[in-house]
Amino acid sequence: MSAPTLYEIQLRFQHLLKEEFRATSPDWLGGRDTPPITYQRRIGIYHAAAEMRFQEALQEDFPQMYQVLGDQDFGRLLRAYLNQFPSRYHSICEVGQHFAEFFLSPPAGIVMELLTRHPYLSDLAAYEWTRNLAYWAVEFPPLKLEEMQSSAAEAPESVVLELHPSVFLVESSWQVDRLGTSRKLASRDGVKLMVSRQNGRVTGRRLGKKPWALLREIAKGTSLGNLEECLNTHQIKPDEALRLIASWVSNQVIGSFRRQNK
């Protein structure tokens, strides 16, 4: 059997670090057993270090979940997650993006056990990952309210408002924004949150029914001239809608607008 090339060794070593650790032959990596530390022990050290770094990263990205589960259960959960969704990226920033999805089709064992005790974990993972997306979202100059108003006055049916890249709408049956501060985690009417970043700080703000309905309609891409159905359905007065939109523009909730063809 011919010796592996450097490129093959790099790919195989990357595979060992990201996938579940399994015993391999030294020849598979072009290595040798050199006492006093065996080949398997050497590879195991690197694999353990990579796993620890993944856990540190996910603790930072999902601090509430880590607080709820504790170090031991969070570590067990991480290993189950990485077995199902091993990292496919060079950056460690992306490793947690499938966490919410992971809980929707969980493997048996530790994950099912944790979901029995904490049925809100999927919603919590989605909320915390959204906060990460908001923090890292691109920044650009604020929209000028006068410019938007001028375009809207000329042809409102062609003006489509767009949320700032750091703004996300999150809906949950659980009080994912108040974990640790509220004994009642279930919410009878659900929780509607606007996750956004302002001055480098990410917040999750609860919205009432009217602001939520209007902002969600805007997020769908409905033009200003076609918001009438939404306003009537949710009993939002036109001047109330205008005040909300002006406030969202001023606070960079709405980041831009575009003109669509008729």
Image (cartoon, grey):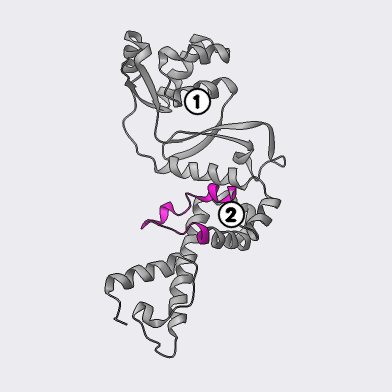
Circle on res. 216: 1
Q: Position of residue 178 (x, y in %)?
A: 63, 40
Q: Secondary structure at mark 1?
A: helix
What residue is rendered at 46% in x and 45% in y? 132
User: Which quadrant is the N terminus positioned in?
Assistant: bottom left
Q: Quadrant of the C terminus?
A: top left
Q: Residues within 10 Å of mark 1 (few under 14, many from 20)?
A: some
State whether residue 67 is above or below residue 211: below
- Residue 31 point in image, percent of width and height: 36, 82
Q: Is residue 142 above or below residue 22?
A: above
Residue farthest to the bottom?
35
Residue span colored magenta: 82-104
Q: Residue 66's mark?
A: 2
What residue type is disc 1 on? Arg
Please tell me whether residue 97 belongs to the stretch shown in magenta: yes
169, 146: nearer the viewer:
169
